[in-house]
Image (tube, rainbow, N blue to C red):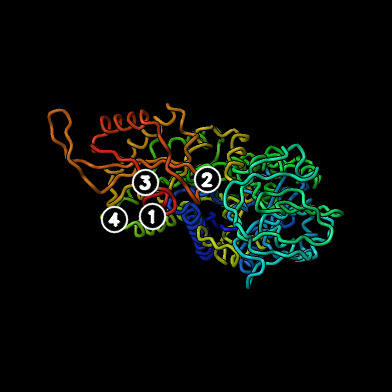
Amino acid sequence: MDVDGPNVQGPNQATATTQTSRHFNKCAANWYQLKNRIDGPGLFARPGLCCFIDSCNLNKRTSEMTESASADNSSVAGVNSFGQDDIVLVLDFGSQTAQLIARRVRDNNVLCKIVRHNLTAERIRELAPKGLILSGGPASVYGDGAPKVDPAIFDMGIPVLGICYGMQLMCQTLGGRIQPADSREFGRAPCSTTSVNALFAGIPETFTAWMSHGDQVDTVAGKFNVIAATETCPNAAIQHQDLPIYGIQFHPEVTHTEHGARVLGNFVRDICGCSGSWRISSLIEQQKQLIRETVGTDQVICGLSGGVDSSVVAALISEAIGDQLSCIFVDNGLLRKGEREQVEEHFSDHFKTDLHVVDAGERFLTELAAVSDPQKKRKIIGKVFIDCFRDEAKSIPNAKFLAQGTLYPDVIESGANPDGPAATIKSHHNVGGLPEELGFELIEPVRDLFKDEVRRMGLELGLPEQMVWRHPFPGPGLAVRCLGEVTEERLDIIREADAILIEELHTAGLYRDIQQAFIVLLPVQSVGVMGDSRTYENVAAIRAIESEDFMTADWFPFPHEVLQRISTRIINSVRGINRLVYDVSSKPPSTIEWE
């Protein structure tokens, strides 16, 4: 147990226009709802969502997509969307670190995908992985309803590595005995290897391992040898004498385990025989070709948000099909300082994209007048966004595809992949899932990538670093960082203060060390003294966090002199703020965004 419209011509124009309107309305609704769900209280505040085109489904059209979505709630995407690259599968038993395992494997330039734990041996054979990793999990192997694995996977000749619960389940399945540990291990523990073996090649005889378990392997069966032990866990790692099957009780994927990355590297490169040939640059060319074959002569619409995910998708598709891509950017008046100008510069001037900018700030602010409740703000913004997107989309002829930004973690956690982890093992609520009926066929070319991989792709495509590394931003924009009523005056205040904060982070060399930083304008006034005058103005808060996955986050420990400089500049320069506070709460229990 781990403790853990088209411009329609002809006599049927009116009917066709109505159908087209519905078509775009569904598209816009789908795009915004996904963006808002994925981003949650922050635009791409999670490693956001984007999907791969499967070469096996290149000729499918809307009716087939609808049937597929109804059947498994997934879009056009296969498990191995990367062509012939070697692949390692992680069978997920509900581990909190399954995504981290996949990331560590990918650090070896080996494609790694997360699938559900009960995938059959037959299905695994179809996917043709070079190796299997059984993740940890919160259950006990002897507990009621404990997740199991198809025993036939151990007879396939494919290398298997069981981690924590995965090791225990493997041993139980093959005849071993699992018992509650006399001394449960949580945290760092000295681990010593007991024999020379491929898994621990190049690793010191004694190293620090991160343990997190209440059960452990009491007796190994058959032809297993013990290859590592700790003081309280005599079977900390095992190896089969004849088969390429290994088990480790500790977690090599976490940074607390010394040489953990080397352990995983030894497994995928030396034991599984993966070539390490997977590269973002080759992936770009593969995806461009798939996009061309899928789209043909049709038009693609991409909803730009200003965030990195949609920007990378737009840049990739633009390189693939040129003027067959049309981008819609809705300026809702709730953007950061200079955001619209940056999008226009990069996608109109640099990529020469057919960019449709909808100037809707006044419309949004009118609808938001006197609204303070954050959920009402979101609903209003969502509705107005859909209306704006739909209206603009009607002006784009021959559009049959919608390009979205959707990242791999969201696909995993939403259960959108039919081979992905089962929701009964690990439920997530960041993605509500695609509607059963789609107005467009989806093109989601980064569906299988993590956030940092999308950023690398953006740099390869020539996007500027300031766009690629820009911090996440909420789907509803500054409306949810402007607590209370949203007015043009209050938005101007927060915009200016936020720009100063970001500028100072760059000056101090801290911007890339912080995963998200922003200003929150509070519905609170305080007394102050500026010069000889008494003031009664707004209180603002700084929020800055460090996080690996945005599921958990800690407040950033600013050097005092940097905080002092930020505070001095904002209070002296931004009229309307006379007091600044720093948010020192972690997630959980707090969220990253305030609303």
Front label number (2 vs 3): 3
- Kind of residue sitting beneath label 4: Ser
Find the residue positioned furthest to the top: 507
Q: Where is residue 183 in the image (x, y as percent from the top left)?
A: 60, 57
Residue for point 84% across, 56% down: 157
Q: Name the residue under label 4.
A: 372
Which of marks 4 and 3 precedes in the sequence?
4
Which of marks 3 and 2 precedes in the sequence?
2
Which of marks 2 and 1 precedes in the sequence?
2
- Kind of residue sitting beneath label 2: Cys
Tell me if 483 is positioned left or right of 85 in this view: left
Inter-mark Cα distance, 1 to 2? 20 Å
Q: Mark 3 points at which residue?
A: 478
- Kind of residue sitting beneath label 3: Leu
Inter-mark Cα distance, 2 to 3? 22 Å
| Disc assigned to residue 381 | 1
- Classify mark 1: residues with Cα within 10 Å, few (<14), some (14-19) or many (20+): many
- Kind of residue sitting beneath label 1: Ile
- Classify mark 4: residues with Cα within 10 Å, few (<14), some (14-19) or many (20+): some
Q: Position of residue 464 (x, y in %)?
A: 54, 32
